[in-house]
Image (cartoon, grey):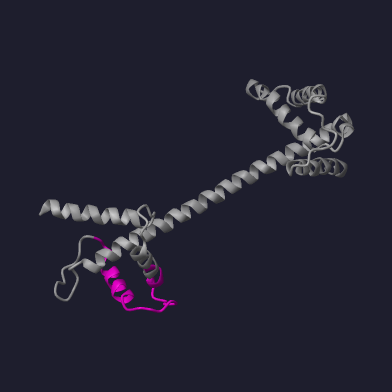
Amino acid sequence: PNGQHRVGQQAYAGDQTSKQGFKPTWHKSKDDLPLRRRMIQLIMDLLQKRKPDAPQEWRQKIPEMARRLEDSLYRSAKSREYYNDNQTLKQRLQYVATQYQKQRVDRVQNMSQMAKMVKQKEDVLRQQQQRLLLLRHASKCKFGTAANPQVCTATKHCAQMKKLWAHITKCKNTSCQTPHCVSSRYVLSHYNRCKEQKCAVCKPVRDAILKHKNDVKAVE
């Protein structure tokens, strides 16, 4: 196993070098074609022997798998003799296949991580939009005041947002520990300064405000 690992590591190290743009000196594209076709056939034979009872769907993939494996061996081999060494072929193929599998796992994990980051960004965006709309409502709502104690039915967050609005209009503390104070002042500051018509945070809020104004005018 250790010998197999060393053989594979040598192949992988060569493969990494070739990916960085250093073409092995022994490569001769046209002259190497017969040798490469022979190697592809050898790999196909090995794959077929490895799974003689494989379903038709898998057997149809053998030529493409063989071409990909051969290409990796060709690009990674440090010499023609090393590339053409049948004694180490199985070990090199096993190592390359292991690296392919590892890369697939890494890609899946990276995609999963990216999906989580996108979702987190979308969640933050929705929270900022909702905060802006609620704060705007709280700043204009006439219910729940000393003059009009009737409970607001527009949103269940109205009373809470009124308290927050009253606080942030006076607070200047950049490290304020009042819940939602700093984040609310940040998003309000952005909204008041933002001139970007297609801003992901502000545009949906502007659209909602405009729709509300139009609805009020239509009723009047």
Q: Front-most of 35 and 114?
A: 35
Asked which quadrant contains residue 57, the reply is top right
Q: Which residue lies at the image location 12% right of the left edge and 52% below the top edge? A: 219
Whether residue 9 sits left or right of residue 128 in the image: it is: right
Q: Residue 52 appears at what percent x and percent y?
A: 73, 22
Q: Residue 41 appears at what percent x and percent y?
A: 78, 22
The span picked out in magenta is: 155-184
Determine if the magenta segment contains residue 161: yes
Q: Which residue lies at the image location 83% right of the left edge and 36% below the top edge? A: 77
Q: Residue 39 appears at what percent x and percent y?
A: 80, 25
Whether residue 146 sits left or right of residue 130 in the image: it is: left
Give the quarter of the figure containing the C terminus: bottom left
Q: Front-most of 170 and 28?
A: 28
Determine if the magenta segment contains residue 121: no
Question: Residue 158, relative to residue 169: is it above or below?
Answer: above
Whether residue 160 sits left or right of residue 67 in the image: it is: left
Q: Which residue lies at the image location 27% right of the left edge and 71% below the top edge? A: 162
Question: Residue 174, relative to residue 77: is it above or below?
Answer: below
Going by the picture, which residue comes out furthest to the front?
Answer: 195
